[in-house]
């Protein structure tokens, strides 16, 4: 794919910069640079207010391809411009990412007109937040093994029972889209059958319990969610069609946002280089070689993202992208600690096992990046997808 920015895109870039400069003001100072991986717990009130600010400006949903929900519509290259400029000014990490970039495209592809009119405008206004109910304690990478179930009650409503885990921002979300088994008999023949994609309001204290999961970084962005007869108001794509809808959603997960993620990676690498210059670690030839290698790999990731962006669907492209950035980010975290030397192992003096503790950015980078090759589909699963769906290799015997 030939990818580049024309005069219209550059004019749009100027509009984006002007809007961000004007609106990312002192009201949101506490949230600037906060809310990304490893700091999703920070600046919560300011970031929710920022979502509403974005919504007022029409900047939520610019990639939906349809207007009429309170959103602008932008071309593919303009979406890239927005993502890159947003990342460059270190605007707050998005609270509404799951609703805007995962649920909304799924509703546009598989939902009814009524569902789109009900759920897309509040997302576009930054008013309703979503979380994702996929993984379970025994069904993470092997998602088809899920045990959460849903059955109709006497009033014809779906009642959801089961447990989800690693649910980002479940403690803040207004809604959760949940994969649940609605036809256990169909699942006995093929595990992917009999699953439905349900929309569940989170404000059901008698039927939903959210428990935070404490991480290596001392924070709790992720949660366990327990459903005990929670009411589900809608099914997307039809009863028993949840697996198709869920796989369609995962295809939306990587795209323009990958390029914005890489802008963040650039800033993290620059911070490591600045530290290496300041403390003399750059004199070490192994450190210099590591920096050059990471820089070259980051450029390769960008070219790969541009090559696949907006092109024909490729079953292996998301897996290749995930393999590239997951391992790269881990190696960056390792290099960051090598550059810091012994002081990187020193924590806060007032640390206690039962209380959150403050880490500096590079310590947090190292610890949080340990999960990069697991969440969002482990490296092993990504390689299996490439082997079976792209290379046509036989499935592993079970």
Image (cartoon, helix red, strand yellow):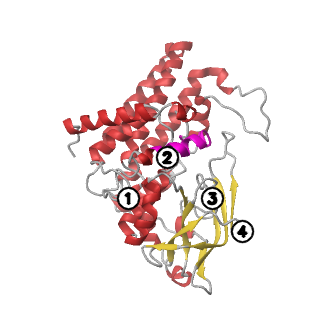
Depth check: 283 or 178 in front? 178
Helix, strand or loop at mark 2: helix
Residue at 61% over, 39% down: 42
Q: Is residue 277 above or below residue 363?
A: above
> Is residue 395 at all visible to an observer of this figure?
no
Depth check: 252 or 137 in front? 252
Helix, strand or loop at mark 1: loop
Answer with mark 4 or mark 1, whichever residue precedes in sequence: 1
The residue carrying mark 1 is: 69
Residue 220 lies left or right of residue 99; in this view the side is right
In this picture, which residue range is highlighted in magenta?
A: 36-53
Residue 245 on image: x %, y %: 43, 68
- Local packing at callout 1 (Cα closer than 10 Å; few below 14, some 14-19, many 20+) is many
Q: Nearer the viewer, mark 1 or mark 3?
A: 1
Q: CA distance from mark 2 to mark 3?
A: 25 Å
Q: Which mark is residue 51?
A: 2
The residue carrying mark 4 is: 206
Answer with mark 2 or mark 1, whichever residue precedes in sequence: 2
Answer with mark 4 or mark 2, whichever residue precedes in sequence: 2
Residue at 38% over, 55% down: 70
Q: Nearer the viewer, mark 4 or mark 1?
A: 1
Residue 154 on image: x %, y %: 62, 87
């Amino acid at each position: 794919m030939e990818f580049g920015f024309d005069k219209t895109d550059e004019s749009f870039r100027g509009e984006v910069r002007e809007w961000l400069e004007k609106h990312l003001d002192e009201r949101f100072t506490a949230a600037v640079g906060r809310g990304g991986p490893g700091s999703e717990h920070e600046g919560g009130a300011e970031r929710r207010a920022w979502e509403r600010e974005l919504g007022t400006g029409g900047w939520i949903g610019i990639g939906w391809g349809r207007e009429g929900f309170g959103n602008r519509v932008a071309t593919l290259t303009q979406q890239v411009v927005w993502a890159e400029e947003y990342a460059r000014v270190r605007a707050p990490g998005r609270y509404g990412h799951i609703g805007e970039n995962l649920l909304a495209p799924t509703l546009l592809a598989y939902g009814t007109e009524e569902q789109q009119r009900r759920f897309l405008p509040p997302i576009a206004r930054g008013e309703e937040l979503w979380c994702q109910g996929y993984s379970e304690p025994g069904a993470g990478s092997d998602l088809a093994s899920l045990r959460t179930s849903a059955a109709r009650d006497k009033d014809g409503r779906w009642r959801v029972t089961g447990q989800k885990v690693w649910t980002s921002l479940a403690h803040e979300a207004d809604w959760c889209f949940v994969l649940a088994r609605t036809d256990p008999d169909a699942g006995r023949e093929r595990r992917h059958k009999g699953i439905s994609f349900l929309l569940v309001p989170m404000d059901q204290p008698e039927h939903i319990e959210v428990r935070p999961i404490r991480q290596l970084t001392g924070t709790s962005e992720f949660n366990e969610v327990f459903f005990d007869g929670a009411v589900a108001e809608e099914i997307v794509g039809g009863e028993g069609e949840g697996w198709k809808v869920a796989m369609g959603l995962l295809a939306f997960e990587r795209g323009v946002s990958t390029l914005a993620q890489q802008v963040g990676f650039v800033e993290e690498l620059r911070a490591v280089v600045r530290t290496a210059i300041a403390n003399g670690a750059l004199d070490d030839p192994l450190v210099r070689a590591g920096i050059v290698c990471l820089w070259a790999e980051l450029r390769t990731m960008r070219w790969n993202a541009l090559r696949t962006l907006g092109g024909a669907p490729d079953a292996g492209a998301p897996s290749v992208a995930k393999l590239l950035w997951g391992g790269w980010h881990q190696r960056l975290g390792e290099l960051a600690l090598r550059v810091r030397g012994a002081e990187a192992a020193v924590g806060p003096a007032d640390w206690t096992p039962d209380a959150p503790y403050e880490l500096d950015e590079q310590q947090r980078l190292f610890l949080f990046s340990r999960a990069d090759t697991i969440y969002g589909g482990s490296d092993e699963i990504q390689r299996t997808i490439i082997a079976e769906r792209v290379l046509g290799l036989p499935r592993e015997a079970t």
